[in-house]
Image: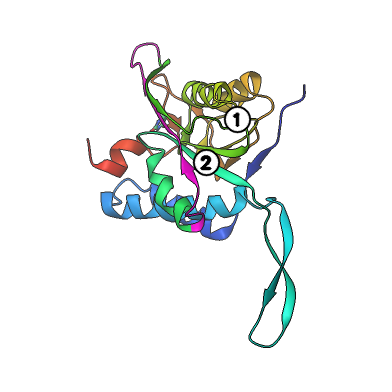
Amino acid sequence: MSAAAVIVVNHPLVQHKLTLMRERDRSIKSFRELVNEVGMLLCYEVTRDLPLELVEIETPLMPMQAPMIAGKKLTFAPILRAGVGFLDGMLALVPSARVSHIGLYRDPDTLEAVEYFFKAPHDLSDRTAILMDPMLATGNSAVAGATLLKKRGARDIRFVCLLAAPEGIAHFQKEHPDVPLWTAAIDERLNDHGYILPGLGDAGDRMFGTK
Ligand code: URA
């Protein structure tokens, strides 16, 4: 099976905001606001192909057939904790989406993803699942997150991140060749600790002020 697409969202607003986020001295408040804003912009891109249907409405002047999203149900699936940064921006655009929280932490020695929490709708087979984590580094968390969603029945999964390392993309595509991914940029490589270079540091720490 050939791998699904990698879509680099090169919209000027996204690129500008990403550059601001990379700056070392940006405040926690500003960083968190930017993640939220970029989450909204990425949501716009990842939902671009949702099917529409024509419905009958009345404008103040006359009846018309107008397009609405055709009953497609969504779940937003943030990987805790940094993925939560995208959530409010995405929910602002799709307020009726369900949320599937995925708790994974990176073992600092092995860099493996360890599951500690998973709370999602009972059956995801009829929902588009938007899996989100700002940093696709080794790919371990994203791979584990997509696996959990598939075990819940998800068949249409889309992965959204802010920055991806080539190593993470390769790993993710090997394990989940059916899942397309959206990113604002593909950076150079990982360092020995699994951080993306040039990157933006630890997204969770920068968002929540924990360093
Ligand atoms: N997680 C982060 O927050 N930053 C990285 O560079 C890699 C993983």
Residue matched to label 2: 75
Residue 61 versus residue 185 in the image, above or below: below
The residue depicted at 65 percent of the width and 81 percent of the height is 59
The N terminus, quarter of image: top right
**Does 21 appear in magenta?**
no
* Left or right, residue 34 beside residue 166: left
| Residue that extends furthest to the top in the rendered view of this protein | 110
Question: In the rendered structure, does residue 99 fall within the stretch colored magenta?
Answer: yes
**CB of mark 2 near ligand 1 (< 8 Å):** no
Mark 2 nearby-residue class (10 Å; few <14, some 14–19, many ≥20):
many
**Residue furthest bottom as drawn:** 61
Could you tell me which residue is drawn at 68 percent across and 53 percent down?
A: 70
Image coordinates of residue 35 in percent, x first then y, are 40, 49
Q: List x then y, in percent, for residue 145.
A: 50, 26
Q: Cα distance, mark 2 to mark 1?
A: 10 Å
Front residue of 90 and 194? 90
Please name the residue shown 56% across and 44% down the image: 74
Q: Is residue 209 visible?
A: yes
Q: Position of residue 132 (x, y in %)?
A: 49, 38
Question: Image quadrant for the C terminus?
Answer: top left
Name above or below for residue 202 compared with residue 40.
above
Name the residue beneath numbered marker 1.
Answer: 154
Please, is residue 31 above or below residue 151 in the view?
below
Q: Which residues are magenta?
A: 93-110
The earlier-in-sequence mark between 2 and 1 is 2
Q: Amino acid at mark 2?
A: Thr
Q: Nearer the viewer, residue 208 or 163?
A: 208
The amino acid sitting under disc 1 is Ala
The spot of residue 195 in percent (x, y) is 41, 27
